């Protein structure tokens, strides 16, 4: 595994990449040269701040995306399968639906917000 920092639209992400050969098998890391003691002892880059993952009663984002619309209001009663939020990632819309019957207790995101996979977007009570 190789650790990389990727910047997309000004937002940095720390990722781990597994380098594969042509057959799809993992390759051993290739050393480009000998590192000095100073560079070997350099501290790792600070991780980027992550949004909290959804907890009990919270509905998580199924993927990293941008919120297109919030299709409910706080206090609305919803049934399992009702459309709650529309997300856009890679020019495709994804609908987030109610996992169960309930009442919208809190809306944690708004149109235009970037969300991470697993981030709480709504609270259902």
Image (cartoon, grey):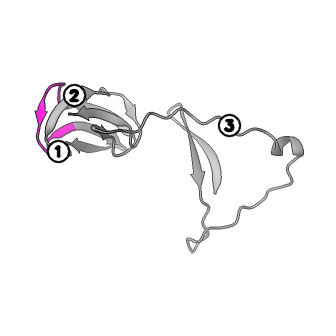
Q: Name the residue under label 3.
A: 45
At horizontal 63% and vertical 46% (from top left) the residue drawn is 4
Position of residue 28 measured from the top left corner of the image (x, y, whole percent) = 70, 66
Q: Main SS of the magenta segment?
A: loop
Q: Name the residue under label 1.
A: 100
Position of residue 41 measured from the top left corner of the image (x, y, whole percent) = 82, 42
Residue 72's quadrant in the figure? top left
Left or right: where 120 falls relative to 1 = left
Q: Are marks 1 and 2 in contact (CB under 8 Å)?
A: no
- Mark 3 vs mark 1: give the one in front: 1
Q: Which mark is residue 105?
A: 2
Q: Earlier in the sequence, mark 1 or mark 2?
A: 1
Q: Is mark 2 on a helix, strand or loop?
A: strand
Q: Which of marks 3 and 1 is nearer the N terminus?
A: 3
Position of residue 35 measured from the top left corner of the image (x, y, whole percent) = 85, 49
Position of residue 50 measured from the top left corner of the image (x, y, whole percent) = 49, 35
At horizontal 39% and vertical 32% (from top left) the residue drawn is 114
- Graded by Cα atoms within 10 Å as few (under 14), some (14 to 19) or many (20 or more), the crowding at tag 3 reads few
- Graded by Cα atoms within 10 Å as few (under 14), some (14 to 19) or many (20 or more), the crowding at tag 1 reads few
Residue 24's quadrant in the figure? bottom right
Pick whichever, 58 or 36, lies toward us: 58
Number of on-image labels: 3
Q: Range of the magenta residues?
A: 71-84
- Dividing the image into 4 quarters, which one contains the C terminus? top left
Q: Above or below — where is 29 with respect to 5? A: below
Q: Are marks 2 and 3 in contact (CB under 8 Å)?
A: no
């Amino acid at each position: 595994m190789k650790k990389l920092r990727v910047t997309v639209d000004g937002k940095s992400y720390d990722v781990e990449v597994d380098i594969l050969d042509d057959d799809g098998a993992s390759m051993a890391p290739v050393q480009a040269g000998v590192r000095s003691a100073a560079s070997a002892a350099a501290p790792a880059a600070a991780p980027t701040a992550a949004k909290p993952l959804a907890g009990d009663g919270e509905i998580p984002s199924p993927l990293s995306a941008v919120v297109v619309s919030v299709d409910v209001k706080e206090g609305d009663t919803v049934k399992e399968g009702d459309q709650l939020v529309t997300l856009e990632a890679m020019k495709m819309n994804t609908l987030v639906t109610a996992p169960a019957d309930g009442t919208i207790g809190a809306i944690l995101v708004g149109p235009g917000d970037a969300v991470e996979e697993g981030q709480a977007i709504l609270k259902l009570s």
